Amino acid sequence: MKLEFDSISLEFGMHRVLSSVHMVCNTGEIIGLLGRNGSGKSCLMRIVFGSVPAQSKSVRVNGEYLIGNYMRQKIIGYLPQHGLLPDFVTFGEALNLFGVKADRIESGFPELTELLNQKPFQVSGGQRRLFEALLILFSDHPFCFLDEPFSGLMPAHAERLTEIIKKVKPRKGIIISDHLHRQVRSIADKLYVLANGKTYPVQSEEQLVELGYLTNL
């Protein structure tokens, strides 16, 4: 499957956040989305997902335009930057809501099965983030948006999550953004930088410097 989006425009008053965006993600690919803080990465993901309105947008799967809730329910699984689960839902209940079997969690992170009767506010931020990322990755959506999935994770957990991302890649298209850019770059098949409201495909570290994402090599 092919997810493509462009013609996205987002403005807040006189401030233009997004103006010229074009990205393509196929199932079987990991796409890295980099950008400095405030560049609009989270806004872009939320617009394509369908939870934030924009002045204009075009989102297509295999050439067919997507509108409204259809993309949220059938096409895209989205891990937002500031948390996925409400505090009143246990992790076990969340598995049922996302259609994920507990043994899938256990196979990669057996220690997380001890959390199934607990609620998000009862565990550490890293544990919560890890569980939420796995819910999205193990769901049936053909595309996954991961916004800061490594936030708050121990280095060992970040490495194991990276391996799971690579493991599910053959059946999913994954767009991932994180301030740990080396982690993203190490697994990305293609890389984009969002700067000045526009997306730029990049292939070298020199381009990251030219676009202002890195200050030096």
Image: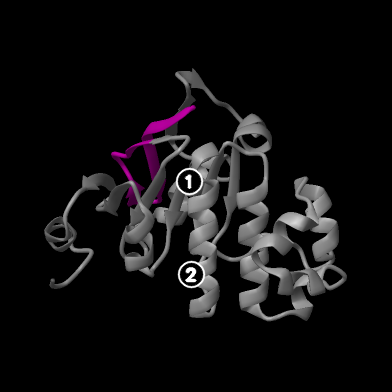
Query: Which disc number belongs to residue 33?
Result: none
Tell me what residue is drawn at x 57 percent, y 57 percent: 80
Q: Is residue 58 visible?
A: no
Question: Which residue position is annotated with label 1?
Answer: 174
| Identity, as a three-letter code, of the amino acid under mark 1 | Ile
Viewer-proximal residue among 164 and 154: 164
Query: Which disc number belongs to residue 159?
Result: 2
Where is residue 217 drawn, in percent x and y? 13, 71
**Can residue 200 be found in the magenta stretch?**
no
Mark 1 / mark 2, whichever is N-terminal: 2
| Identity, as a three-letter code, of the amino acid under mark 2 | Glu
Looking at the image, residue 86 lies above or below residue 32 = below
Q: Give the magenta-colored segment's residue range.
A: 1-24
SS at mark 2 in the image: helix
**Is 42 left, or right, of 82 in this rendering?**
left
Q: Residues within 10 Å of mark 1 (few under 14, many from 20)?
A: many
SS at mark 1 in the image: strand
Q: Is residue 117 visible?
A: yes
Residue sticking out furthest to the top: 64
Tell me what residue is drawn at x 24 percent, y 44 percent: 201
Q: Are marks 1 and 2 in contact (CB under 8 Å)?
A: no
CA gap, disc 1 to disc 2?
A: 17 Å
Tell me what residue is drawn at x 47 percent, y 35 percent: 27
Looking at the image, residue 25 lies above or below residue 45 = above
Closer to the observer: label 1 or label 2? 2
Viewer-proximal residue among 181 and 82: 181
Looking at the image, residue 90 lies above or below residue 203 = below
